[in-house]
Amino acid sequence: MSASVKESLQLQLLEMEMLFSMFPNQGEVKLEDVNALTNIKRYLEGTREALPPKIEFVITLQIEEPKVKIDLQVTMPHSYPYVALQLFGRSSELDRHQQLLLNKDLTSYIGTFDPGELCICAAIQWLQDNSASYFLNRKLVYEPSTQAKPVKNTFLRMWIYSHHIYQQDLRKKILDVGKRLDVTGFCMTGKPGIICVEGFKEHCEEFWHTIRYPNWKHISCKHAESVETEGNGEDLRLFHSFEELLLEAHGDYGLRNDYHMNLGQFLEFLKKHKSEHVFQILFGIESKSSDS
């Protein structure tokens, strides 16, 4: 069989070793064929001529909030990671629609990896970081409301960090989504790129979900602030609209767009909007007040 398949199988064994170190307890990683790894090793050593069966297994993930479990079913084609991985998440706590949506977004995320990149550990991390919203959205839709109780909403403010935001089409998408939804905040373009979005929780989560997928890899929510409110949340907003923030920059303005935004100006902007505390969260350095 071709060297490329053997190379793929070697990488698969390496990734399985990483998974067993992450899930060391017996039964956490459930192989469909308990002899699968042994047969692959024999094939690579030359003591087995026939191509071994594919590695198939299930990992049960415990999601902390809400307290639910997800079974991640994985099948490794013989040429993975140079061809697409087959994986599917299931949970008895998800209805069919939410389960399909979760798997669509998971597949889109895995699709951003380049051929040759191992991605099962990343898929597990994605589920642990992102799956809670699919369960919570289901509760919002299906839990019966009690008219006797006042309606409470969660007002959310998300601080999002990206290595850079340059592309015109991406900037337009961010502004369009922000203005379409009932959210306020800003998008600071350049390097680094910072987005703040605030509004009702479901609107902010839809904004985050829409701009992030299908293929924005280097972006993360660094900080989130939430508060329960029975009103419309207008008194909680720090911003009056959703706008693009353009600051002075320094560096190379050439083809690479390798220039950094003026963080001193950004700090002053945060002070004006009562958000100076976020500077250290975003950049890991303490802000220095200009009047001290």
Image (tube, grey):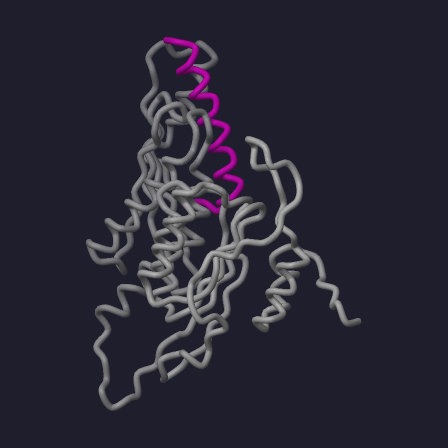
Q: Is residue 145 in sight in this rendering? A: yes
- Image coordinates of residue 138 in percent, x first then y, are 26, 64
Query: Which image quarter holds the C terminus?
Result: bottom right
Name the residue furthest bottom.
148
Name the residue located 37 percent from the left edge and 27 percent from the top edge: 36
Q: Is residue 6 found inside the magenta-colored segment of the image?
A: yes
Q: How many marks?
A: 0
Name the residue located 50 percent from the left edge and 45 percent from the top edge: 165
Give the main secondary structure, helix, strand or loop, of the magenta stretch.
helix
Residue nearer the viewer, 101 or 28: 101
Q: Is residue 24 in sight in this rendering? A: no
Residue nearer the viewer, 247 or 113: 247
The quadrant in which residue 148 appears is: bottom left
- Residue range in magenta is 1-27
Residue nearer the viewer, 285 or 92: 285
Name the residue located 63 percent from the left edge and 68 percent from the top edge: 276
Name the residue located 36 percent from the left edge and 46 percent from the top edge: 213
- Image coordinates of residue 168 in percent, x first then y, are 42, 43
- Image coordinates of residue 104 in percent, x first then y, are 28, 45
The quadrant in which residue 39 appears is: top left
The quadrant in which residue 95 appears is: bottom left
Q: Is residue 199 found inside the magenta-colored segment of the image?
A: no
In screen coordinates, is 262 left or right of 118? Answer: right
Query: Which image quarter holds the N terminus?
Result: top left
